[in-house]
Image (tube, rainbow, N blue to C red):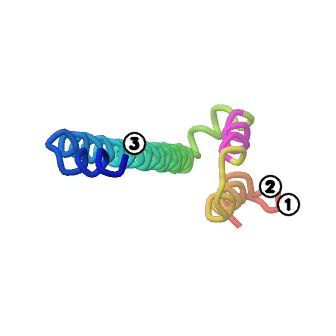
Amino acid sequence: MRLALGAFVTSSGFGGVAVLTAAWIAYRTAADRLSGDRDIAARAMAAKESQDAEADRRERWWAAQRWLWENRTALIAADPVAVSRAIASLRKQADTETQYLTLDVMIVGMFPEALGEEKGD
């Protein structure tokens, strides 16, 4: 048995088996690595898309706030209830302290009577 095994190990057939085994191990290692790289890339892409969506949502929030503030006089004259609803909608969508404080300043600036003051004081 030992002689037969020794003969096989030194034969050309063993070299072929060794090469095939090494190739299979290299293939599996590379496939596992590529699969892991794909998973990392997919997670990175999802995180970037989420960050982009969040940045876009905040930019739209600030654009709506800016438009509301810049057109406050005409909007309040036309429909003050709609303006207060728009502010309430912005408040629901706010998620930073700066956004909440900005809305507080807007309310005081647009509706000073809410504080018991007259406009122009």
Number of numbered callouts drawn: 3
Residue position marked by numbered label 1 in the rendering? 116
Residue at image point 52% right, 49% down: 58
Looking at the rendering, which quadrant does residue 107 occupy? Answer: bottom right
Q: Residue furthest bottom?
A: 121
State whether the magenta stretch is mostly helix, strand or loop: helix
Q: Is residue 31 left or right of residue 116?
A: left
Q: Is residue 89 magenta?
A: yes
Q: Which structural element holds mark 1?
A: loop
Residue position marked by numbered label 3 in the rendering? 35
**Percent from the top left, x then y, of residue 89?**
69, 40
**Percent from the top left, x then y, of residue 94?**
66, 51
Residue at image point 42% right, 49% down: 40
Q: Are marks 1 and 2 in contact (CB under 8 Å)?
A: yes
**Percent from the top left, x then y, of residue 100?**
68, 59
Location of the C terminus (image quadrant): bottom right
Magenta part of the chain? 82-90
Q: Is residue 74 left or right of residue 115?
A: left
Q: Earlier in the sequence, mark 2 or mark 3?
A: 3
